[in-house]
Image: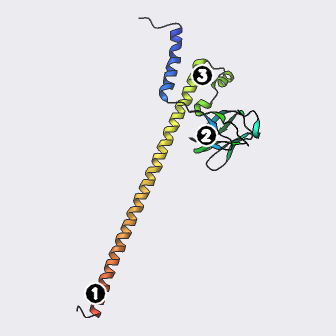
Amino acid sequence: MSGLSGPVAQRGPRLLALLLAFLLGPSSVLAISFHLPVNSRKCLREEIHKDLLVTGAYEIADQSGGAGGLRTHLKITDSAGHILYSKEDASKGKFAFTTEDYDMFEVCFESKGTGRIPDQLVILDMKHGVEAKNYEEIAKVEKLKPLEVELRRLEDLSESIVNDFAYMKKREEEMRDTNESTNTRVLYFSIFSMFCLIGLATWQVFYLRRFFKAKKLIE
């Protein structure tokens, strides 16, 4: 029996790589659009792992025609309040940063203006991890073939999944240690409470015995 040849054989590894990428997990992409009323503030929060590249693009459709001095501010912060990106009078642009630790990150849009102004339409597209990398630029710089690019993408995706499992295992170990520590403290507290109760009961017996003897109710 003769094997496949020609375009079908050439597409085989590429299709296999794409199938593996689909089965390995979903992409880390946050694409959302919402309306932002004047003099209001809306924030989006997302938990992101350590040492990940985060990229994003935003566009704010101003339907006021420049009336009311409408201005929109964009600010990205972590849970400690550190500013990772800030843009005054934002309208359209891109941003990128690398996370230093696993944390909750917040993207806030704030609109300021006067008068009756239509709501602004905000479009935000955020990517992190594998999806944030520009593999077309990597292919140009390293002169990679399409199949090599897909294999590189699969390699990065596999590494990301392994890191996720490693983080989950670490969190499970931390929770188990916390649970064991809590159980040990509860045990020690229970033993201490038991000795306190035994001591209190013993003291009450001797006290009542002396009291009854003083009243000559018992010998």
Residue 209's spot in the image, x, y percent? 28, 87
The secondary element bearing badge 2 is classed as: loop
| Nearer to us in this view, 7 or 120 | 120
Q: Position of residue 100 (x, y in %)?
A: 63, 43
Separation of residues labelled 2 and 3 (CA atoms) = 22 Å
Q: Which residue is mark 3?
A: 149
**Which amino acid does the dot numbered 1 rest on?**
Arg
Instruction: Verify CB contact (< 8 Å) between mark 1 and mark 2.
Output: no
Q: Secondary structure at mark 3?
A: helix
On the image, which quarter does residue 40 sit in? top right
Q: Nearer the viewer, mark 1 or mark 2?
A: 1
Instruction: Return the mark for residue 209.
Output: 1
Which one is in front in this view, the residue at disc 1 or the one at disc 3?
Answer: 1
How far across and how far down the image is residue 86, in percent? 71, 42
Closer to the chain start, of discs 1 and 3, is: 3
Q: Amino acid at mark 3?
A: Val
View extreme (top): residue: 2
Residue farthest toward the front in the current orientation of the protein: 116
Q: Nearest the camera: 171 or 143?
A: 171
**Colour style of the rendered protein structure:** rainbow
What residue appears at the point 57 percent right and 26 percent down from the top-left corner? 153
Q: Name the N-terminal-most of marks 2 and 3.
A: 2
Q: Are marks 1 and 3 in contact (CB under 8 Å)?
A: no
Q: In front here: 157 or 209?
A: 209
- Residue located at (76% from left, 35% from top): 66
- Disc 1 from disc 3: Cα separation: 90 Å
- At label 1, counting other C-alpha atoms closer than 10 Å, the crowd grade (few under 14, some 14-19, many 20 or more) is some
Tag 2: amino acid:
Asp
Residue 21 in the image: x percent, y percent?
Answer: 51, 25
- What label sits on residue 51 in the rendered view? 2
